[in-house]
Amino acid sequence: MICDKCQQQNSADARFCSQCGQELAPAAQHHHGETIRHVFSDVADKINRVAGVETPSELKLREVFSNVFVKHSEEDAEKLFFVGTSYTTPQIQNVVDSWPKPWLFARVFLLAALIYFGLYLGVDYFGNLNFLPGLITLGSFLVPFTLLIFFWEMNAPQNISIYKIIKMLFVGGILSLIAAVFIYDRIGDTHSSIMIGIVEEAAKVLVVLWFLRDRKYKYILNGLLIGAAVGTGFAAFESAGYAFRVALFADLDSMYSIIFWRGVLAPGGHIVWAALSGAAICMVKGSREFSWSMLKDMRFLRIFAIVVILHALWDLPLFADADFPLVQIILTVISWVIAFAVMNAGLKEISYLKHQQEVQL
């Protein structure tokens, strides 16, 4: 029996690994787990073939998220926030091309959740409506901002500072919303889910393109992060608007429900969709100056079409009005299968560029 932790071969009846002491799963349970992994891997391969990216064979999510439960000091967090400045951005030969192990996003989530609970007590328990604006704002940003920090930690080139990302969040969020409203105003408000997908994803892409005009943002992982920043702003501002309207015209319980479900489903929506579009742009653009003809490239068109379809399916009345968001959960899984494949492509890009640098030297 092979240990999942250290890959040590053990006897068939062993309960613990002779190398690391890890408890070993029974053979039947291990076989069942392997079957599930094989099925999921097969499905992921099919999804990623459609998207035109390769499923990462070496990816182990348990390892990627292994630092989440490791104790970190305040100094560790402060060091992370130095990343991305002109003084701290590493040269390409010094960039680590293995899978990052993010952890700060989990701390941000816990801290924001505690603050949100305090605001909730102020509104619901003490009946003080002065807490309401803060509750709506923080509740709408809680999960989207957490996801943005995750994408920031996954940006292996470490060439974008947290200051610039927050600026992209707010500026990109409002510009993409205004762009979407402007397009709706010109074509007429539509209830067609496919048109909603096209308009809103196109609006975000236009803003992402504006940020990517800077040629130093040339990596696939840069596009992923900048897209996530724009998507975070779009998602959070939109959620705050919905929550505010429900608080005005319905009741607080309905508002809490809106904030909760939009937070739960945020990982599968605007943020990851815009991130995928941003990464696709950088796949095509690289370090070159952008030209509109690049958007005809199949690498971009494939991923953008998938994003629009995912958005359209998400908004279909048949699925959007369901009691339990099963379809949205499935669409979230599909989005993240592609997202991790795109991250893998980004890490391979860095490996290739490092090799090219070594050859030139």
Image: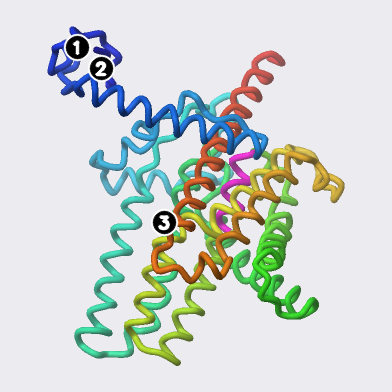
Disc number at residue 146?
A: 3
Task: Give the class, few, some or many, for how many residues have Cα within 10 Å of label 2's Cα (few <14, many ≥20).
Answer: some
Q: Is residue 148 left or right of residue 221?
A: left
Amino acid at the residue labelled 2:
Cys
Q: Which residue is mark 2?
A: 3
Quadrant of the rendered structure where residue 1 is? top left
Q: Are marks 2 and 3 in contact (CB under 8 Å)?
A: no
Quadrant of the rendered structure where residue 264 is? bottom left
Residue 87 visible to the viewer:
no
What residue do we see at 60% from left, 30% from top?
54
Image quarter hosting the C terminus: top right
Label 2 – label 1 distance at C-alpha:
9 Å
Task: Give the class, few, some or many, for how many residues have Cα within 10 Å of label 1's Cα (few <14, many ≥20).
Answer: few
Q: Horizontal and vertical percent for residue 229? A: 56, 57
Label 2 – label 3 distance at C-alpha:
33 Å
Above or below, 114 against 71 in this view is below
Name the secondary structure under disc 3: helix
Q: Which residue is mark 1?
A: 19
Q: Which residues are magenta?
A: 220-229
Task: Give the class, few, some or many, for how many residues have Cα within 10 Å of label 3's Cα (few <14, many ≥20).
Answer: many
Name the secondary structure under disc 1: loop
